[in-house]
Amino acid sequence: MTPPHELLRQLRLALQADDLSTALDCLRALIAQAEAREDWSAAARHLGNLALLHYRTGQPEQAIWAFEHGLERARQAQDPHTENGLLGNLGNVLREVKRYDEALKALNGALLLAQMLGDARGRGLWLSNLGLLYDELGQHALAYDMHQQALKIAEQLHDLPQQAARTYHLALCALALGQSEAAQLMRSAAQLYSQLGHQQQAQKIRRQARRLTYDE
């Protein structure tokens, strides 16, 4: 039997080489070994990575299964930190496949856990994803509140990439609500993307802001 440290090395090399088939085999072996020794936290983490890899290879239903199985293991291990990440990522995949009721339940559960754990970064992520979900449901007033809270957390954490993305999400939400601040929010988002060196994205958003200004 291949020891876990060797499987992890093979997994890392497979991911670097974009050899996803070998990466999947390594993760399945790691999960089986962790479950055999009843290391439920390790099993949960490996199942989360398996889920992300399934999603990356266009297999969302298999990703959902792996996340759900990982959640069982995380709860068995009484590992709320791992549970939080699995639950939030499950919510994101459920949103992508338009299983909105289940996505809301998962993301709200992750948000509650992040609050209990004092995990500001996680709380910001789940608020942002809840905002995107409410946008897709056409509930823009709720989405605006989520995006605004998520942006405030990114600012507190001095997380420039998340500030840029969340400012842009807030701008699109403001636009959907017919708010005049949408153009200014877009200009702010463009400036943040420019600071990050993402000039193409910055130019695209500036053009959107100019069109809004002309239409006013």
Image (cartoon, rainbow, N blue to C red):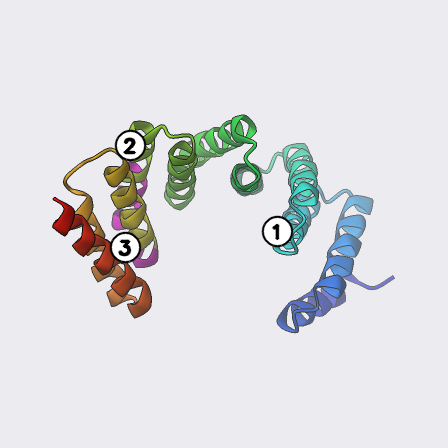
* Image location (x, y in percent) of residue 127: 38, 37
Q: Is residue 57 left or right of residue 187?
A: right
* Number of the front mark, 3 or 2: 2
Q: Residue at left 44%, top 36%?
A: 114
Amino acid on which the number 2 mark rests in the picture: Asp
Task: Let me know if residue 89 appears in the view.
Answer: yes
User: Separation of disc 1 and disc 2 at Cα?
Assistant: 28 Å
User: Separation of disc 1 and disc 3 at Cα?
Assistant: 27 Å
Disc 3 target residue: 158
Q: Residue at left 38%, top 30%?
A: 138
Disc 1 target residue: 52
Question: Exactly how many numbered labels are in the figure?
Answer: 3
Figure quadrant of residue 147 = top left
- 180 or 192: which is nearer to us? 180
Q: Quarter of the image containing the C terminus? A: top left
Query: Mark 3 vs mark 2: which is more N-terminal?
Result: 2
Q: Residue at left 36%, top 28%?
A: 139
Task: Let me know if residue 157 appears in the view.
Answer: no
User: Can you tell which mark lies on residue 145?
Assistant: 2
* Image location (x, y in percent) of residue 101: 53, 26
Region in magenta: 149-161
Above or below residue 72? Residue 208 is below
* Image location (x, y in percent) of residue 77: 66, 36
* Residue 72 among magenta residues: no
- Crowdedness of circle 1 by 10 Å Cα count: few (<14), some, many (20+)? many
